[in-house]
Amino acid sequence: MSNQYRHEPVLLEETVNLLVTDNDGLYVDATVGMGGHSAKILSKLGRQGKLIGFDWDPEMVNISKNNLSSYGDKVKIIGTNFSNMEEIFKREGIFNISGILFDLGVSSLHFDKPQRGFSFKHEGPLDMRINPANPLTAHTIINKWPYEQIEHLIRICGERFSHKIAKAICERREKKEFETTTELRNVIEEVLPKTNRKSNPATKTFLALRVAVNYEFENLTKGIQKGGQFLAPGGRMAIITFHSLEDRIVKETFQFMSRMGGWKLITKKPVIPAETEINSNNRSRSAKLRVIEKVK
């Protein structure tokens, strides 16, 4: 792997310390990425301990297989979205896992590679697909979806000026289709004031597109439900989120599970990065970790 692309696993010590309760258990990294969290989990496991990693991105599957190759048959990486884990577990004959981790969002590699089209900081195609086989792209949404759908999508991701942005997008595409991330960013910057904003005016629109292209909220809900079915008593589920909409889904779902019985909240409040981590890795600043345990 090129040294140009690196990914620092967020809340690494905190996550693994809360997740691993059985050193000889079977753990699942549902979003293995480059393998940072997985390597830390594997380093804590005993002779019988094993890990299965999932990733929807074929590039990440290859990178993590290479990065974790020294662990041999203690680790198995499978290229699939974690929403498919039920089928995978049944196929592999797995019915009890000791812990499952979801590190949501996307990797630094996705943001840093212009050709993946995730970032408004680099000019690239309006793509944003985690898996290149996915037929839906940001290009399709921006150029083909009606005003109402675009406005709703941007609004639910927290953009107060969703109507202005959606209107500007629809007016611009009548003259010429959007092709690049820079074209979209420039249109948004033209209609939104930059004053008193901590982030670029395009931030929430790009987030909304990424979430829609990769079915992130739908897959998160499926992942929690399916993963919970396979956790052994005493097993834990840890989820790291990077924006308020994801965190709200996790918070409310965990609270509901706890109220219904059979589950115990391990983190009453989310664990957040220490100042030292934020200073060394700015992308960790919005991370929140929540953990729940299946009651014995």
Image (cartoon, rainbow, N blue to C red):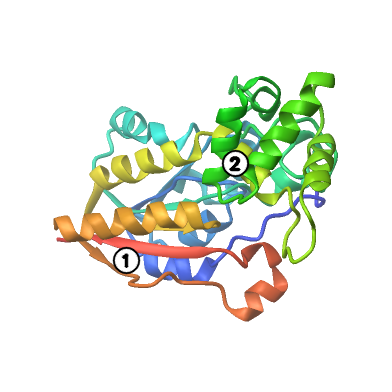
Answer whether labels 2 and 1 touch (C-beta < 8 Å).
Answer: no
Against 254, is 115 above or below?
above
The amino acid sitting under disc 2 is Ile
Residue highlighted by disc 2: 154
Q: Which residue is drawn at 27% across and 47% down?
A: 228
Residue 212 vs residue 193, the one in the foreground: 193
Residue highlighted by disc 1: 21
Name the quarter where the C terminus is drawn. bottom left
In the displayed structure image, the side of residue 278 where residue 153 appears, left or right: left
N-terminal label among 2 and 1 = 1
What residue occupies the far bottom of the structure in this picture?
Answer: 275
CA gap between label 2 and label 1 equals 40 Å
Q: What element carries label 1?
A: loop
In this rendering, the label closer to the viewer, 2 or 1? 2
Against 270, is 144 above or below?
above
Residue 129 vs residue 188, the one in the foreground: 188
Q: Where is residue 157 in the image (x, y as percent from the top left)?
A: 55, 47
Q: Position of residue 148 (x, y in %)?
A: 57, 29
Name the quarter where the N terminus is drawn. top right
Residue 239 vs residue 73, the one in the foreground: 239
Q: How crowded is mark 2: few (under 14 residues within 10 Å), some or many (20 or more)?
A: many
The amino acid sitting under disc 1 is Thr
